Image: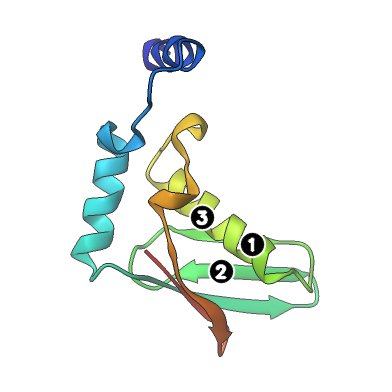
């Protein structure tokens, strides 16, 4: 709670906010580096929707009810799942912290890091 108050004050006063100074963000980046710098996701589509599961880090799972999601919707959900797994608060979730290494879907696998 106190950190969020600090963040809001810093934002109001136009202080630069560096998410990478947060211990959760550092923990996430270290975990990704330990598995080779890339996170591969297996995406399965079915009539009720879709699911995506990370091959390298157990517990990063997401999905949706739309059986035909766009690539952008899948990428957004995967990013949210990665941030949630490491407990990164929403105000620190910046897309540039996780870059999409491969935008093209090959056999329904995606690579993030």
> Which residue is label 3 attached to?
79
Of callouts 2 and 3, the N-terminal one: 2
Neighbours of disc 2 within 10 Å: few (<14), some (14-19), many (20+): many
Most distant residue in the front direction: 14
For mark 3, give the secondary structure: helix
Percent of width and height locating residue 33: 22, 62
For mark 2, give the secondary structure: strand
Percent of width and height locating residue 61: 51, 61
> Which residue is label 2 attached to?
52
Percent of width and height locating residue 86: 37, 44
Of callouts 1 and 2, the N-terminal one: 2
> Which residue is label 1 attached to?
63
Q: CA distance from mark 1 to mark 2?
A: 6 Å
Q: CA distance from mark 2 to mark 3?
A: 11 Å
Give me the residue at 42% from left, 48% from top. 85
In the drawing, does residue 71 fall left or right of residue 48? left
Say above or below: 93 vs 2: below
Give me the residue at 27% from left, 52% from top. 29
């Amino acid at each position: 709670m106190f950190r969020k108050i600090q963040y809001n004050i810093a934002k109001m006063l136009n202080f630069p906010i560096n998410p990478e100074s947060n211990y959760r963000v550092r923990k996430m980046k270290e975990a990704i580096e330990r598995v080779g710098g890339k996170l591969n996701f297996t995406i399965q589509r079915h009539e009720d929707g879709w699911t995506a599961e990370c091959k390298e880090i157990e517990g990063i799972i997401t999905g949706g009810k739309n059986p035909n999601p766009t690539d952008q919707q899948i990428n957004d959900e995967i990013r949210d799942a990665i941030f949630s797994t490491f407990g990164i608060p929403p105000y620190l979730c910046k897309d540039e912290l996780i870059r999409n290494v491969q935008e093209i879907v090959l056999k329904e696998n995606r690579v993030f890091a």
